[in-house]
Amino acid sequence: MVRTLRDLWDGGDPGEEDAPGVGVFPRPVGPLRLWLSSAGGTETFRAAGRSGTGVLTHLVKQDMDGLAANIVEYRRAYASAGWPGHGHVTLMLHTFVGPDHDRAVEVARAPLERYLVSTLTQVRRSPDDQVVGRAREAVRPAADRYLSRDGLIGGPEHTADAVARCREAGVDEIACLIDFGIDTDTVLDGLAHLDKLRSSESTA
């Protein structure tokens, strides 16, 4: 499938008799960039390396050490397949940066917990108060983890440390998930602090 997509993007023919004239219109003006999404499975990282695609991943089912190990496997497979460069790993992180660490965590906590509750199948099937209450208790450890170490949530120093851990693990890019329930005005205000973090990291 990846090879077919690349061939079509480059103007090739799929070579199927029942699909004459299939192509990409208008003509592409740049190279096709593809990612495989992985929840943390090592074989998916290897498959992305063999295919020469990027990886889009998160920390729901893997910690930073596990991610670092997966990235090593990805780079090894990428190099063995003869692709140029070293590939590209994008890590999705829940994000809210503010000038004061404790205040930023306080603002993010309740929306993040509500968001995590909303992702649970049992809540979608039976959203009564008792089920939601049990779900909120169940997601609290995950919320604590994202707020303390596996997210980009907090003040400038804390979030800069988080970016440094990502870099040490081999992450090339952080995809900032800002839409987990904080009100719009507060999110927009936080973007200024996120941009300061971005600027400081790009010059580091």
Image (spheres, rainbow, N blue to C red):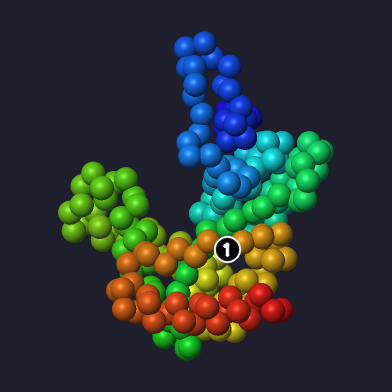
- In this view, the residue in front, 70 or 84, is 84
Nearest the camera: 67 or 125? 67
The residue positioned farthest toward the front in the image shown: 26
The residue under label 1 is: 174
Image point (77%, 41%), residue name: 83
Of residues 82 and 27, the one nearer the viewer is: 27
Label 1 Cα neighbours within 10 Å, binned few <14 / some 14-19 / many ≥20: many
Where does residue 194 sit, x and y in percent of width and height? Answer: 51, 77
Residue at the spot 32% in from the left edge and 45% down from the top edge: 121
**Residue 89 placement, left or right of 191:** right
Q: Find the residue positioned furthest to the bottom.
A: 100
Q: Nearer the viewer, residue 177 or 14?
A: 14
Look at the picture and state if 90 lies above or below 83. Answer: below
Numbered circles on residues, count: 1
Residue 146 to residue 44: above or below: below
Secondary element at tag 1: strand
118 over 17 or under it: above or below: below
Q: Is residue 6 visible?
A: no
Which three-letter amino acid code belongs to the residue tagged 1?
Answer: Ile
